[in-house]
Image: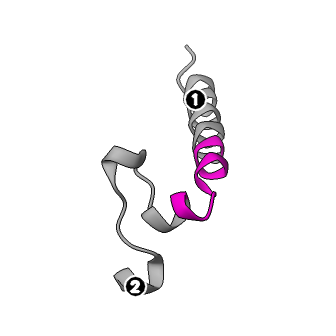
């Protein structure tokens, strides 16, 4: 991974975001998308594991 090209490494203290994402104001959008994916994954798992 080219750290300079990707905007830096992910940092746990800033919500596992890259510093460039926080600096350019993309953090809210990224966190909302992660939450949407998480909810969809949980819903899919529930459907697959119903008895």
- Tell me the quarter of the picture where residue 24 sits: bottom right
Q: Where is residue 13? Give x, y as percent.
A: 33, 45
- Residue at image position (65%, 35%) is 40
Between 27 and 48, which is closer to the camera in this rendering?
Answer: 27
Tell whether label 1 touches label 2 (CB within 8 Å): no
- Residue at image position (36%, 86%) is 2
- Secondary structure, mark 2, is helix
In the drawing, does residue 11 fall left or right of residue 41?
left
Q: Residues within 10 Å of mark 2 (few under 14, many from 20)?
A: few
Indicate whether 47 appears above or below 18. Answer: above
Between 39 and 21, which is closer to the camera in this rendering?
Answer: 21
In the drawing, does residue 51 fall left or right of residue 4?
right
Circle nearer the N terminus (2, 1):
2
Indicate whether 40 appears above or below 1. Answer: above
The residue under label 2 is 4
- Tell me the quarter of the picture where residue 3 sits: bottom left
């Amino acid at each position: 991974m080219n750290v300079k090209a990707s905007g830096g490494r992910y940092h746990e203290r800033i919500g596992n975001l890259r510093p460039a994402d926080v600096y350019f104001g993309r953090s809210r959008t990224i966190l909302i998308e992660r939450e949407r994916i998480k909810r969809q994954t949980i819903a899919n798992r529930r459907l697959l594991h119903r008895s």
